């Protein structure tokens, strides 16, 4: 599988903090944007669109709903909550009828936006679609295993190997059913994230982000966004 920018895989797990929206078609002339706070040592943040505040006091591990935004060139800022201190200043070129996710990623001293174009079209019958992001700055390079629940990793080859912070995988469509996602330190079988049994239902679209604990570092977990149900 070819990596673009970030990578992990499947859905659901302890930290589900997201929006769910079955209708991904906005009014003509609009795009939709959601913002995810994934910087583990950053304070709560405010989000501004063209210098107008659209979200306030967003805590770590929180994702907004999709917000309707005029298509075209738009400026998005992320400020420390209640201040004029801007930590992200990004110019976005938004396409009419398109969904986007903007992730505030990395430690506070080096926070950067990850801007993703989302595919919230309906998966093929009987399938779910998932996308994964290595968004845990405190985690090492990792290998990703996607298996049947309880499968023995000792005899399993990773689906993705050597995934680094900041890597994003292409979407994958998979048959609906039960899976287990395990993330290990690269080149080892030492598990740093274990999803447990995950159930993917037909028609779902999910984004899974590997994240640090509050303040940074272990224990690591998955933040799962419900893109489409």
Image: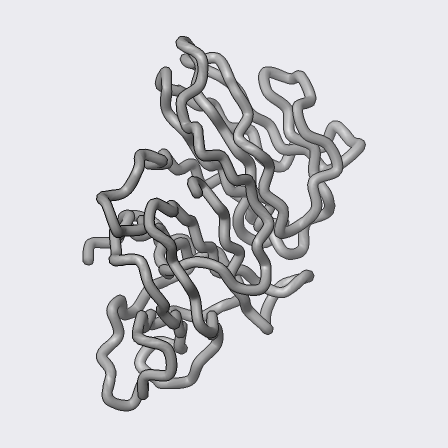
Residue 112 x/y as whole percent: 51, 42
- For this orientation, the residue located farthest to the right is 82
Residue nearest the observer in this picture, 186 or 117: 117
Q: Is residue 47 above or below residue 97?
A: below
Q: Residue at x 31, y 88 (%)?
A: 152
Kindly identify the residue that appears in the image at 25 percent across and 58 percent down.
175
Question: Residue at the spot x=37%, y=77% of the render?
Answer: 149
Task: Measuring from the top left, give residue 216's x and y in whole percent.
Answer: 62, 63
The quadrant in which residue 179 appears is: bottom left
- The number of callouts visible is 0
Q: Is residue 155 shown left or right of residue 31? A: left
Q: Residue furthest left?
A: 1
Q: Nearer the viewer, residue 127 or 14?
A: 127
> Is 104 rendered above or below residue 11?
above
Left or right, 210 with reference to 62: left
The residue sitting at 49% across, 68% down in the picture is 139
Name the quadrant containing residue 145: bottom left
Q: Is residue 134 left or right of residue 143?
A: right
Residue 46's quadrant in the figure?
Answer: top right
Could you tell whether 101 is left or right of 56 in the image?
Answer: left
């Amino acid at each position: 599988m070819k990596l673009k920018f970030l990578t992990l895989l499947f859905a659901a797990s302890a930290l589900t903090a997201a929006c769910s929206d079955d209708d991904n078609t906005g009014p003509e002339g609009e795009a939709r944007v959601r913002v995810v706070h994934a910087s583990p040592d950053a304070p709560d943040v405010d989000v501004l669109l063209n210098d107008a505040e659209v979200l306030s006091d967003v805590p770590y591990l929180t994702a907004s709903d999709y917000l309707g935004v005029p298509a075209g060139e738009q400026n998005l800022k992320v400020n420390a909550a209640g201040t004029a201190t801007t930590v992200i200043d990004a110019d976005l070129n938004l396409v009419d009828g398109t969904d986007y996710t903007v992730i505030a990623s990395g430690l506070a001293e080096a926070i950067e936006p990850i801007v993703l174009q989302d595919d919230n079209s309906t998966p093929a019958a009987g399938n779910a679609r998932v996308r994964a992001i290595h968004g845990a700055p405190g985690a090492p390079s990792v290998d990703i295993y996607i298996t049947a629940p309880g499968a023995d990793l000792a005899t399993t080859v990773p689906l993705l190997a050597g995934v680094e912070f900041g890597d994003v995988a292409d979407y994958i469509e998979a048959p609906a059913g039960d899976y287990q996602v395990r993330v290990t330190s690269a080149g080892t079988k030492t598990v740093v994230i274990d999803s447990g049994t995950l159930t993917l239902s037909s028609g779902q679209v999910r984004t899974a982000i590997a994240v640090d604990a509050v303040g940074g570092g272990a224990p690591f977990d998955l933040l799962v966004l419900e893109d489409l149900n």
